[in-house]
Amino acid sequence: MFTGIVLHSPVGRTFTKDQQQLGAIGFFVPYRDYKGWAASLPLLEIISAYPPAEKREDRAVPIRKDRQDWVGRMRVGTHGFIGARLTEARQARGMNGTELADLIGVSPQSVSQYEHGKQSPSPEMLELIADKLNMPLSRFTREVSHSESNPIFWRGKTTATRAARDRAEVRLIWIREIIDYFASFFHFPSLDLPKLMDSPKDFRQIDSDYLETAAASVRMHWQIPDGPMPDLLLEMENNGIVISRIHVGVEKLDAFSQWSSAYRIPIVVLNRDKASAVRQRFDAAHELLHLVAHSKIDPKRLNSASDYKIMEDQAHYFAGALLLPADEFTNDLWSPTLDGLLALKERWKVSVGAMIKRCKALSIVDDESEKRLWINYNRRGWRRVEPYDRKIEKERPRILRRSISQLLLEGEQSVSQILSAVSLAPKDIEELCDLDSGALTDDTADVRATPILKKKIQPDEGNVVNLFRRKITRISSSELECP
């Protein structure tokens, strides 16, 4: 039984029973006045009940085209559009909703509706969005991968803006997706981190003795020779840590790291915007302690300013102990002065600032001497740029770059296939995988002018490519001379 109603129009008209029934089941009821056809859902007043009509007749009423939007006609959107991917793309480009709205010529409310799945942009609008955000169209219909529950350890969290962290976190998502793509072709190096003995259950109980022992354990476990660390990024990747470098856009966010629950591997992301190689090495060593000693910490602890500072101080100390082992560094230091420390910088590839802190930690200098060192350090203008910062070459991660190169050289995938599978802009993939600029965007990128062996040698383990221990035969210049 329908509930009987009387529909009152804004001009006081009533409607027929048929029109009343349409209103009762939620239709817009058209009526005509001196302006022509209009459409509105007037105020409903329930007054009685009456039986439904035994036979429903055709009640389709024509509505003028210029009034279609008034009846809430839904516009045709893009099939399969996923709003979360628009949020991701916007954050990756460092924009807020208002900035994106201005860029594509819609209201901020429309952008919000797109992102929350309440409205789908038209195909033409989506093409404009993809163009402005430099994203492939396929990105906006790609299923969202599962989110990570493991915490992210930010170096510089307290000074970096929320927008900067969002921009960086999106790239962490992209790195995981790239790893997922490579996982169907390669085995990455096995994870081999030392298990620290007698670790305190409460991270706040970790002291300097523990950190000295932890740094020594890492060196011993990875069989790193005494003296300066040869290539820290290589050592970390050789032992199963995936490393990427990105342009964060701000110098305050130095690095960050996270364990991937899907692949049970740690990922470290370094800031390309940092000017010096020595500070990049220190950032990598800093993140290593988070992976070794802080991986099981309750994520809520990271929201506590005091707990966060404790963890950061511990990571700072560990980085100094790892890069500057006490005995070797002390024996190498002939004078705890700025000039004496600077003389060691190229050999140890550690900043003078980090060496000052290490000298204090090892009681090589007292409080007053440390204070004088910092005063002179600032007077020389070294707080911003130290001598040799631009001379020492930055270390580069290898695993992701070699994965791309190997796929292309072995003919397993073409550039177009890689771009389609990863569904990111070529320049984004080049950055995340530490490829040379233009590696995936040159017109000849798909052309591989390399000699091909008549008989292709297959690896021992089927379709497994060893990315780090490929044997290279070197040919002397005399062998290349023509007879």
Image (tube, rainbow, N blue to C red):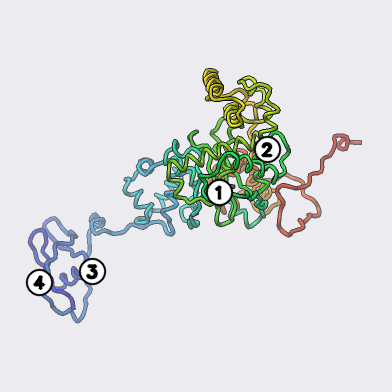
Q: Residues within 10 Å of mark 2 (few under 14, many from 20)?
A: some
Q: Amino acid at mark 3?
A: Ala
> Which-is-in-front pick, marks 3 and 2?
2
Q: Amino acid at mark 4?
A: Ile
Q: Using the numbered discs, state the Cα–Cα distance from disc 4 to disc 2 in whole angstroms.
A: 84 Å
Q: Residues within 10 Å of mark 3 (few under 14, many from 20)?
A: few
Residue under circle 2?
Answer: 231
Rendered-image quadrant of the C terminus: top right
Disc nearer the start of the sequence (4/3)? 4
Q: Nearer the viewer, residue 34 or 144?
A: 144
Q: Using the numbered discs, state the Cα–Cα distance from disc 3 to disc 1 in whole angstroms.
A: 76 Å
> Residue 47: which numbered mark, if any?
4
Residue under circle 3?
Answer: 60
Helix, strand, or loop for circle 4? Answer: strand
Q: Can you name the residue that lies furthest to the bottom here? A: 54
Disc nearer the start of the sequence (4/1)? 4
Q: Amino acid at mark 1?
A: Pro
> Which-is-in-front pick, marks 4 and 2?
2
Disc nearer the start of the sequence (1/2)? 1
214 sits left or right of 52 in the view: right
Q: Amino acid at mark 2?
A: Asp
Residue 425: image location, x then y, percent: 53, 45
182 sits left or right of 224 in the view: left
Residue under circle 1?
Answer: 200
Residue 381: image location, x then y, percent: 53, 20
> Which-is-in-front pick, marks 4 and 1?
1
